[in-house]
Image: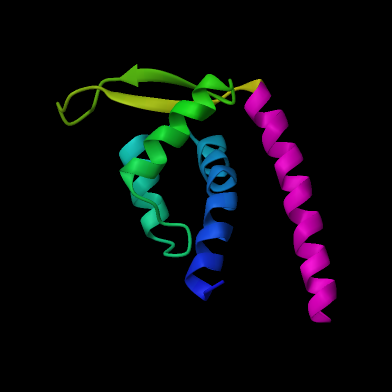
Amino acid sequence: MSIEDWKTQIKRGTLEFCILLMIRRQPSYGYEIISTLEQYPAIAARENTIYPLLRRLLKEGLISSFWQESAEGLPPRKYYAMTEKGLDTLDAMSAEWTNLLNAIHTLKGE
């Protein structure tokens, strides 16, 4: 496996977690999520990855959506917000993430 393949696998496995973390902080719209992720090249993703993921999270009941008018007179934007189920899932994911990081730090001798 090449380093690029490995990086892709890690990114795919953590992107959902990162998006839920962002939405927990504040309701966000799709382009805002994409723009925020672009600030972190290790987790940056395109529309063709983010929007299907958001649809799946909606379908699973981890997030909800609502339309909100734009202050700049632009068309309304679809915002995504956390649900109780999403918060519970995110708590479980956070615990697993901490366990994973602790194991990696131990293996590295840190």
Q: Nearer the viewer, residue 51 or 19?
A: 51
> Residue shown at 39%/60% (left/top)?
39
In the rendered image, the vertical position of residue 79 relative to residue 7, given as above or below:
above
Q: Is residue 23 one of those drawn in magenta?
A: no
Relative to residue 27, is residue 97 drawn left or right?
Answer: right
Q: Position of residue 69 (x, y in %)?
A: 26, 21
How many discs appear? 0
Q: Position of residue 15 (x, y in %)?
A: 53, 48
Quarter of the picture holding the N terminus? bottom right
Q: Position of residue 100 (x, y in %)?
A: 77, 59
> Residue shown at 59%/51% (left/top)?
13
Q: Position of residue 59 (x, y in %)?
A: 52, 20
> Residue shown at 48%/70% (left/top)?
4
Report the magenta stretch's main SS.
helix
Q: How is the image coloured?
A: rainbow
Relative to residue 98, is residue 77 drawn left or right?
Answer: left
Which residues make up the magenta segment? 85-110
Q: Nearer the viewer, residue 102 or 5?
A: 5
Q: Is residue 94 one of those drawn in magenta?
A: yes
In the rendered image, the vertical position of residue 89 relative to residue 37, given as above or below:
above
Q: Nearer the viewer, residue 59 or 65?
A: 59
